[in-house]
Amino acid sequence: GESVGLHLPTLSVQEGDNSIINCAYSNSASDYFIWYKQESGKGPQFIIDIRSNMDKRQGQRVTVLLNKTVKHLSLQIAATQPGDSAVYFCAENRDGGSYIPTFGRGTSLIVHP
Amino acid sequence: KAGVTQTPRYLIKTRGQQVTLSCSPISGHRSVSWYQQTPGQGLQFLFEYFSETQRNKGNFPGRFSGRQFSNSRSEMNVSTLELGDSALYLCASSLVSGGEQFFGPGTRLTVL
């Protein structure tokens, strides 16, 4: 899910498919993670969060998985819809410390009807 | 409940000038954070204000500053603008520091 330069990784799926977006985080001390969705021309929107004492958390049509061993986070979207088309990015933070979040570069999700 | 509002939405400045951006948080929210978003660097944390005090600061030069008023409205100032300051500046508010954040639509700053 990380990108270099101007181009974001892109995930193209068909409507109704399940989508998995990945994110590698850098700080082993990070203990709070958030997924955001950003539609064109809008600010980011909170989707789901997870703390490091959990491996999995589910929301409505979304699931976040956390693998602390390899510092990897994933967002699963079930039955993807055209309205899910957006840029998704993760953020990490040390919840016990100061609030200074670090964001991934994002993945562009394109859902084809 | 009204969302986070930011003014202006678009701004064009020239190098060397200074700029002030404004953010009105959701009513009742006392924390306001500012972010810079560029294609090259992505989304980066600038600073956070809570109850009129800067609580946390990202890794940006001193040309970037901010303040928060007693009504929780916040302003961000960038002095001596550089071409690289061209970006989308986002603010987000939350009830408490580090809580779930609600973002505004951003101010698109272009430095010529």
Image (cartoon, helix red, strand yellow):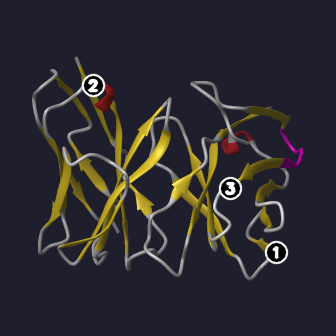
On screen, B74 above or below B81? below
- Choose between A5 and B102: the one closer to the eye: A5
Disc 3 to disc 1: CB gap under 8 Å: no
Q: Is any atom of residue B75 visible in this view?
A: no
| Residue A84: % across, % down | 69, 45
Q: Give the camera-side residue of A47 and A95.
A: A95
Q: At x 73% / y 51%, what residue is drawn?
A: A23
What residue is rendered at 62% in x and 69% in y?
A30
> For the residue labelled by badge 2, is the local secondary structure a helix, a strand or a loop?
strand
Vertical relation: A84 (above or below) B96: above
For residue B19, side relative to residue A8 (left or right): left
Q: CA distance from mark 3 to mark 1?
A: 15 Å
What's the amino acid at mark 2?
A: Thr
Please give the range of residues in magenta: A15-19
Query: What amino acid is at disc 3?
Result: Tyr
A32 left or right of B45? right
Mark 1, residue position: A55
Name the main secondary structure of what is drawn in magenta: loop
- Image depth: mark 3 or mark 2 in front: 3
The answer for how far apart the CA atoms under marks 3 and 2 are is 30 Å
The Cα–Cα distance between marks 2 and 1, rounded to whole angstroms, is 42 Å
Question: Which of the image's four quarters has the N terminus of chain B?
Answer: bottom left
Q: Mark 3 or mark 1: name the one nearer the start of the chain.
A: 3
Q: Would you name the residue on which mark 2 appears?
A: B110
* Residue A110 picture location, percent across and down: 73, 33
Q: Position of residue A26 (x, y in %)?
A: 66, 56
Which of the 4 image quarters holds residue B85?
top left
**Closest to the observer, A2 or B62:** B62
Crowding near pointer 2: few (<14 within 10 Å), some, many (20+)?
Answer: some
Tag 3 near tag 2, CB within 8 Å: no
